[in-house]
Amino acid sequence: MRIQRLARYAALGLAAGTVAFMVIWVLFIGRGTNFGSAVHNPKDFLITLLNGITAAALYFVVASGFTLIFGLMRVVNMAHGAFFLLGGYIALTLQRRWVGQGGGFGLTSEQVNLTNWILPALIGAALVGLVGVAMQQTLLRWNQGQELRQALITIAISIIAADQMLAHFGGVAEDVAWPHKLDQFDNLHVSGIIYTRTRLFILALALVIGALLWVWLKRTRIGMVIRAGVDDRQMVSGLGINIQLTFAIAFFVGSALAGFGGVIGGSFASLAPGVDGNWLLNSLVVVIIGGMGSLGGAAVGSLLLGLTTNFASAYLPSNYTYYSIIFTFVLLAIVLAVRPLGLFGRPA
Amino acid sequence: MPEPVLSVSGLNAYYGSAQALEDVSFEMGAEPVAIVGRNGMGKTTLCNAIMGFAPPQATGSIRFHGAEIIGRQPYRVAGLGIGYVPQGRRLFPSLSVDEHLRMIRGRSEDVGRRWTPAAIYELFPRLAERRRNGGAQLSGGEQQMLAIGRALLTNPKLLIMDEPSEGLAPAIVENLIDVFRTLAQEGLGLLLIEQNLGVATALAQRQLVMVAGQIFTETTADILSSDPEAQRRYLGVEPLAER
């Protein structure tokens, strides 16, 4: 007992020390880095901060769907990344069908108006939502409660989907074109920062989605049933509520969020084989940090992941920026040392 | 004789290969029935089998107003008019008192619904004071009131209660007994699962004694309360007189 407690204090101390050192490094030292410390160069610090927050916005859109499905159904949907990529490819196809193929590098934003982005995005999200429900109804439903089987089934789906997408869309990275109105720069009038509008748009989308999810879960009857189902789905069923219907709705919303995230990700970065795996990993990291099944946890987890990845690549000494990916795992280790179930996690 | 409300016959239940209920048969009409027995005798398993909760794996027949309900989904069983107050209350920690009551829509066939959230608050004024509190922040008695209120909101014809007096102070138990009596007088069927013989005999004349997964015998509250030897043997409790 004594040794366990000592080990726990040591872990807490080490975690606190590491965090303190990283903060002090970024704020005051920053020796050998590209920008120098924050006090020395506030502008690049603020830009890195904004980059972190806007990256977190996209993490949140994708991971909130992942955590919704896990929280209610205890299904770790390993096909979430494939759904992300599928949503992006559907939107890409629709956009090119409506606007045209564009030049050798695809469409440019001059050719695309707002509708040509929003409509493909919504259709892509909705179709992926339907794919998710179809998968849940045909493959997962009769394996309810068998978590290993469900994980294996969704892994199988993701592998098959990845190969099919490679066959249909090819292996070359392509991207969904932003509408011209968004593909601009804004002067923020803070330290003379000129910032890309698309990133701010992603942040706004994430805030709207987060608010809608919050209202849905907190204020509507279905939201109450979902929260009750996270606690004790058998008891919900014993009160005359068809929890299977609720499962289908949650699976639709969760998958659609992956698809919508894929459209944003495909516009912000690009769509290519392998992107699905990255985004599955991102979602897993976010919900492990935040706590499986918690919406607030997904928000905080996204923020921590977004800030960590961006600050690590910007504030490592310039010879070492290649190692910035390691800090994702440092973050995981610190959070799990302090809160083994994630920041907002509760025992299942 | 009128059609029985609940009719169980030849009910077996298994957890994997372990048998928890063996050839359980009984019928009940409109009058309250209590099933008494010690821990681990299969009382909660019987509730799970009736509600359609799995596990256990149940075989045999359970008829509710003539309709076979074995193997049906729990929400369909509840939809037919069986309300369930589980052992340990099983409230939802994520929901407030008010949300517990608002999430239930009740049976669709009801035209004049007896139970609404407002009616529950009238029945249990304590809950109205606590409507914003979380399910986990309530006292034991308030939790039990909420579990009962939640079950009543499904507008059941039969209420199955598993150990409703467990862990409650005697004064609160007396209170609940009064409420149950009122409900029974309104015509609600009560199937009470109890270890507390005082509660069981106060509410139901018919007493079914469960031993090792079987209905060992049927007796009445009067006989059971006046037979300390039987109480000790079937229930492992100290006789009532010493309560």
Image: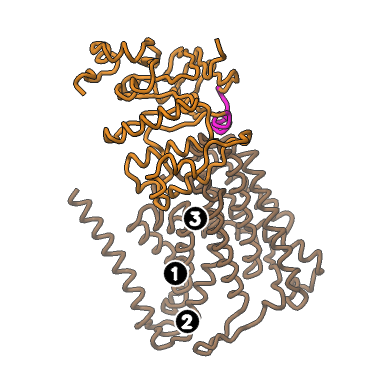
Between A187 and A278, the residue placed more toward the observer is A187
Mark number displayed over residue A186: none
Whichever of labels 3 and 1 marks the residue nearer the N terminus, that label is 3
Q: Are marks 1 and 2 in contact (CB under 8 Å)?
A: no
Residue identifier under label 2: A46
Give the magenta-colored segment's residue range: B70-80
Q: Do the residues labelled 3 and 2 touch (CB within 8 Å)?
A: no
Chain ID, mark 2: A
Evaluate whether label 3 is on the same chain as label 1. yes
Decide whether the magenta segment is chiefly helix, strand or loop: helix
Q: Residue A202, relative to residue B108: is it above or below?
A: below
Residue identifier under label 3: A284
Q: Residue at x 62, y 78 (%)?
A: A197
What amino acid type is highlighted by mark number 1?
Answer: Thr
The tint chain A carries is brown
Q: How far apart are marks 3 and 1 (CA)?
A: 15 Å
Residue identifier under label 1: A308
Crowd band around label 2 with a 10 angstrom C-alpha radius: few (<14), some (14–19), many (20+): some
Q: Residue at x 57, y 20 (%)?
A: B65
- Residue A323: x and y in percent read 44, 69
Q: Distance between the residues labelled 3 and 2?
A: 28 Å
**Element marked by disc 2:** helix
Image side of residue B138 versus residue A61, left or right: left
The chain that appears orange in the image is B
